[in-house]
Image: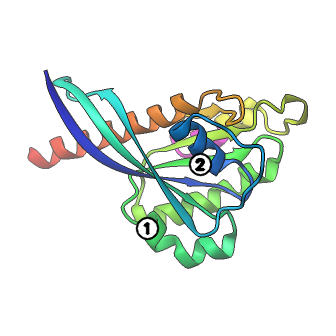
Amino acid sequence: MEVKRMKVKVCLIGEAAVGKTSLIRRFVLDNFDDKYIQTLGTKVSKKELASPSPDGTGDLKIDMTIWDIMGQKGFRELLKEAYFYGARGILAVCDVTRRKTLEDLDDWIEGVYSVTGKIPIEFLGNKIDLKDQQQISEDEMIQAARAYDSPFHFTSAKAGVNVEIAFQSLAERVAKERYARKVVAEE
């Protein structure tokens, strides 16, 4: 059986302290740190994922390069071209204990689209382990994600809930889109 390889750049977007860095740390290193350490600038991590090949001809190894960015708006505007350039997928992260972080994702997504065009997005409602403080309902997540034709996941970087699934789902959607483009280009 043939094993193909694909390199994929994905970016995490969202306001400060929604858990972008913690989600990456849980996914790449499978650990969690309670201390909040603000991301300064950008940080790049890597992880390889396996997936069935979208064309059904074997397995696909996806080398995922994961970009983490500071959540401050001014910084986003300053570096958006360099940060989003070449991105093939987005994890749009909100903090379920702060409704405004979901509302702010529209601006983030428009910033991405202005550089990349329309690319696959997964919405993540992070910090679902803080159920008693939750301000964002499942219906609100569905509505936000549906506006971009995207799935959503409630996640917890702390408890490890749905983190792997979210990254895997995005990787598989990116792979499908790239295969579809390649097939159309060959016709």
* Residue 150 in view here: no
Left or right, 74 with respect to 172, comes to right
Query: The magenta stretch spans which residues?
Result: 143-150
Q: Which mark is residue 55?
A: none
* Residue 129 in view here: yes
Q: Secondary structure at mark 2?
A: strand
Q: Amino acid at mark 1?
A: Val
Instruction: Measuring from the top left, give residue 14's x and y in whole percent.
Output: 65, 55
Q: Amino acid at mark 2?
A: Ala
Q: Residue at x 60, y 38 (%)?
A: 26
Say above or below: 76 vs 93.
below
- The residue most toward the left is 187
User: How many marks overall?
Assistant: 2
**Camera-nearest residue between 80 and 186:** 80
Left or right, 125 with respect to 145, comes to right
Give yes or no for residue 170 being in the magenta stretch.
no
Q: Residue at x 59, y 48 (%)?
A: 92
Give yes or no for residue 146 being in the magenta stretch.
yes
Instruction: Measuring from the top left, give residue 39's x and y in whole percent.
Output: 65, 62
Q: State the image quarter where residue 123 is shown.
A: top right
Disc 2: CA contacts within 10 A as few (<14), some (14-19) or many (>=20): many
Of marks 2 and 1, which one's residue comes earlier in the chain?
Answer: 2
Instruction: Measuring from the top left, give residue 89's x and y in whole percent.
Output: 44, 49
Q: Which residue is mark 2?
A: 92
**Camera-nearest residue between 94 and 162:** 162
Q: Residue at x 63, y 36 (%)?
A: 31
Q: Which mark is residue 115?
A: 1
- The residue most toward the top is 1
Say above or below: 102 vs 2.
below
